[in-house]
Image: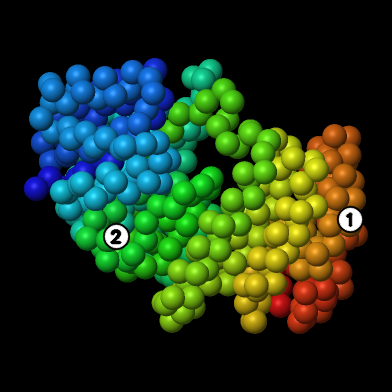
């Protein structure tokens, strides 16, 4: 049995697939198997997989009867894996040289249920943007192993599956699987981090995350961005299934959910203009449904706190007015000033209802009640 199974969903990636496979095979790691899932790709991707599988015995090809999407393809690959750990690698990305040996060594050192590595965004112009795992706890050394409750800074890093190596049996036992739809990593990564007790990190860029010219879904104006609500609802359904384990991090996850929904709304190339009010109303509905009784810390500071209060009040017209004011100010003077935030910040008070005022503060320690 291999120590590590690399799960590679494949669909319309004939331009990148060979580079992805070569980046793994060229590292000559005997403890690795590759489970490539041909998600009924209608280009040459299937033929490329067949050629590689014929030459390399560590490659297993799983063929889907019909195109089922990234989540279903990953689930199928995990079901066919034999390794103790699984690692989802997207077929247009690649693993930098030395990554596999470093990951294997760290797995053996720490025996984690999840290993989180650093990664890098690689842009078409050659620019590389590194994302070290030290971002979880800036200026502080992380313990060898820890839980999500021990290090809630995990919420502040991107919720991608591709920099997480997961104990396969623990994953299956948790009941967490990939779901369909956009933002699918949200409803996989967050419940899984809640479910496990032993998380470790590897402070090395072990994953090259290719950024395309079109920015994928992040620059696609579509009502499909409403699917973020479904993914977050799945997160809270999972938290509700084990409230005791979820209790230490539930309020933090709630704050991050509202922050994320507002980030999607605030992006100029996501939610269609005609759908913005309806999207805001959906965010307010999630707020009402899952708001912790004891309040929650708002991520992002004073400006974010103002937006969270407007969501609590379902005050879309005022939200749009403030966004327009902040945009004008940014164009004239750079980022919005503290003065703007102070002018719009309600007086300190306990938040007890959807439209009530909230306490002051200018950092992520501010709590809305």
* 203 sits left or right of 254 in the view: left
Q: Secondary structure at mark 1?
A: helix
**Picture residue at 19% right of the left edge, 19% below the top:** 51
Residue 332, percent from left and from top: 89, 35
> Within 10 Å of the Cα at label 2, are there few (<14), some (14-19), or many (20+) other Cα atoms?
some
**Picture residue at 66% right of the left edge, 77% below the top:** 295
Residue 222, percent from left and from top: 67, 39
User: Which label's residue is closer to the chain start, 1 or 2?
Assistant: 2
Residue 80 to residue 144: above or below: above
Residue 257 to residue 19: above or below: below
| Residue that mark 1 sits on | 317
Residue 104 falls in which quadrant of the image? top left
Residue 141 - label: none
Is residue 175 visible from the viewing direction of this image? yes
Residue 117, percent from left and from top: 36, 46
The quadrant the C terminus occupies is bottom right
Q: What's the colour scheme? A: rainbow
Residue 356 falls in which quadrant of the image? bottom right
Is residue 102 visible from the viewing direction of this image? no
| Residue that mark 2 sits on | 171
Q: Are the residues at dot 1 and dot 2 in contact (C-beta closer than 8 Å)?
A: no
* 236 sits left or right of 26 in the view: right
Q: CA distance from mark 1 to mark 2?
A: 44 Å
Front residue of this view, candidates 185 and 308: 185
**Picture residue at 43% right of the left edge, 40% below the top:** 69
* 78 sits left or right of 297 in the view: left
Residue 16, percent from left and from top: 37, 21
Front residue of this view, candidates 178 and 193: 178
> Within 10 Å of the Cα at label 1, are there few (<14), some (14-19), or many (20+) other Cα atoms?
few
């Amino acid at each position: 049995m291999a120590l590590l199974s690399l799960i590679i969903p494949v669909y319309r990636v004939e331009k990148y697939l060979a580079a992805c496979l070569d980046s793994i095979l060229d590292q000559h790691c005997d403890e690795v198997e590759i489970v490539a899932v041909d998600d009924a790709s209608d280009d040459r991707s299937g033929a490329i997989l067949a050629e590689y599988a014929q030459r390399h015995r560590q490659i297993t090809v799983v063929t889907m009867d019909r195109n089922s999407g990234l989540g279903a393809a990953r689930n199928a690959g995990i079901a066919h894996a034999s390794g103790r750990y699984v690692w989802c690698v997207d077929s247009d990305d690649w693993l930098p040289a030395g990554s596999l040996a470093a990951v294997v060594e760290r797995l053996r050192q720490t025996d984690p249920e999840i290993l989180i590595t650093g990664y890098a965004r690689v842009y078409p112009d050659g620019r590389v943007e590194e994302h070290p795992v030290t971002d979880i706890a800036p200026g502080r050394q992380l313990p060898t192993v820890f839980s999500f409750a021990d290090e809630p800074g995990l919420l502040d890093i991107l919720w991608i599956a591709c920099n997480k190596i997961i104990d396969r049996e623990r994953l299956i036992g948790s009941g967490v699987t990939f779901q369909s739809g956009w933002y699918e990593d949200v409803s996989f990564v967050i419940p899984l981090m809640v479910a496990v007790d032993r998380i470790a990190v590897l402070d090395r860029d072990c994953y090259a995350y290719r950024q395309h010219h079109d920015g994928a879904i992040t620059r696609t104006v579509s009502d499909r961005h409403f699917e973020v609500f479904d993914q977050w609802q799945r997160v809270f359904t999972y938290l509700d299934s084990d409230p005791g384990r979820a209790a230490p991090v539930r309020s933090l996850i709630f704050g991050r959910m509202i922050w994320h929904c507002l980030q999607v709304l605030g992006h100029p190339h996501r939610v269609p203009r005609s759908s913005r009010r309806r999207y805001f109303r959906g965010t307010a509905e999630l707020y009402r449904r899952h708001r912790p009784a004891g309040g929650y810390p708002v991520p992002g500071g004073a400006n974010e706190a103002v937006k969270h209060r407007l969501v609590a009040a379902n005050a879309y017209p005022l939200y749009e007015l403030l966004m327009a004011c902040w945009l004008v100010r940014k164009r004239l003077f750079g980022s919005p000033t503290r003065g703007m935030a102070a002018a719009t910040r309600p007086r300190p008070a306990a938040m007890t209802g959807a439209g009530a005022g909230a306490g002051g503060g200018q950092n992520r320690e501010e709590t809305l009640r």
